[in-house]
Amino acid sequence: MHIRPRLNRCFSRKNKLNQTSRAPFPVPMGSSSPSPSPEPPQSSAPADGASNASLRWHILRRALLSRSASPRASEGTSNDPQEKGDTNKISRKTSRSFNLFECHTVPISQLNKSQGDSLNGNENGVECQRDVYVCYKLPCGGSPELNVIYRRDDSLELNDIEASNRFNIDTTGLVCCWPSEEVLAFYCINHSDMFRSKRVLELGAGYGLAGLVIAASVNAGEVVISDGNPQVVGYIQQNISINAETFGQTKVKPMTLHWDQEHASDMLNSFDIIVASDCTFFKQFHQSLARTVKSLLKHSETSQAIFLSPKRGDSLNKFLDIIKEYDLCYELIENYDPTVWNLHKSYLAGDDTSWPNYNEEHCYPLLVRITFGDFV
Ligand SMILES: C[S@@+](CC[C@H](N)C(=O)[O-])C[C@H]1O[C@@H](n2cnc3c(N)ncnc32)[C@H](O)[C@@H]1O
């Protein structure tokens, strides 16, 4: 069934989704090993009785206490089984994706010379064993290839948690490319006309697949790929560098952009399109995310923000309430792409068993189109 809710004066919300149990979590796309710890990313929900934040603090506390005693602890690694167990609990991964792009995983050492050179001097550089890259073949004219560097599965480190606490940000951007990001990238490539010559911003981009795909395939004028976690932005920076030759005339830049921060004046009212995937489950950031969209989106009839987000409990609905509070309009669309919709239906029905434990609430991203809506 295709439900495309109509857009009324300021918002539209006609989806009906089943509330079911939790889904398994992803490994980076292209990786083969599914995760043993099935949990969605939630900033406030308890994991085995402890919240993510408190688990992070426990890990940090243990590390700080042992730092003076053990030089190994200061290297950001630990053999403490308790610490490893806790780190695994907050390193939450999904085991599958929609597999919308042809791709394969390649060791970093096989990046070609110019790409490898662009990583020199970076802490995540060519020799870094914890990273892999995934080579995507894009389904558009000329079938360009895009390489995206990801952390290997299970490589969350103490440094990541320290940085996450220091910058008031979670580590979900390092965990993997979440399925919604792949769907967002696919949606953008299939709606290339809307991006032509536009100034585009990706928020909470993680490794930045969607922003990179936009930069490589739709002739946008400029693409800014942002995240609030500086470590994640390190990956975005690398991913832009190694694909620079694919972007043609499109200007592409990474940016550390935390939704809580004051935004630079040259950013205000300047983006034709803002995209984001799986960024609405952080309820504590709903206000600042809505404020960010409102202040950075160009105030014009044609500008819009496109969010792809699984429902994840009541978090998406709560975000939509905040969008209304900010006098923005939204349209919520359940079936926005026939390929994604058919995959979703066949995972749900069990006709396609390649995504075991597929769970609508946590795996299927809904499309939210946000506009100013006050031009008619
Ligand atoms: C679940 S991840 C999604 C990443 C990517 N969009 C994807 O789907 O693969 C959420 C992302 O939002 C970023 N994030 C969380 N809170 C943020 C904030 N307050 N400001 C900016 N980015 C934030 C995280 O660093 C992370 O990269």
Image (spheres, rainbow, N blue to C red):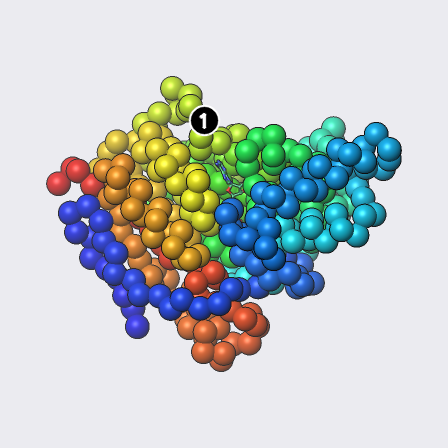
Q: Residue 14 sits in which quadrant? A: bottom left
Residue beneath disc 1 = 261
Residue at position x 24%, y 33% from top?
300
Find residue 77 and report its horizontal and vertical position in percent. Answer: 79, 42
Specify whether tag 1 is near ligand 1 (CB below 8 Å): no
Residue at position x 71%, y 37% from top?
61
Q: Residue most toward the left?
A: 376
Query: Does residue 254 appear in this view?
Result: no
Q: Residue 28 sits in which quadrant? A: bottom right
Find residue 354 and report its horizontal and vertical position in percent. Answer: 57, 72
Q: Residue most toward the top?
A: 265
**Vertical position of residue 68 compared to residue 355: above or below:** above
Q: Quadrant of the C terminus?
A: top left
Query: Does residue 209 appear in this view?
Result: yes
Q: Does residue 278 appear left or right of residue 129 in this picture?
A: left
Q: Does residue 321 appear left or right of residue 153 in this picture?
A: left
Q: Does residue 175 appear left or right of residue 278 in this picture?
A: right
Depth check: give the residue in front, 43 or 129: 43
Depth check: give the residue in front, 144 or 118: 118
Residue at position x 31%, y 48% from top?
320
Depth check: give the residue in front, 353 or 327: 327
Which amino acid type is marked by label 1? Gln
Q: What SS does tag 1 mark?
A: loop
Q: Quadrant of the N terminus?
A: bottom left
Bin the neighbour count of mark 1 within 10 Å (Cα to Cα): few under 14, some 14-19, many 20 and up.
few
Residue at position x 27%, y 47% from top?
330
Number of marks in picture: 1
Q: Residue 35 sits in which quadrant? A: bottom right
Find residue 361 and report its horizontal and vertical position in percent. Answer: 43, 63
Find residue 325 and report its horizontal and vertical position in percent. Answer: 26, 39
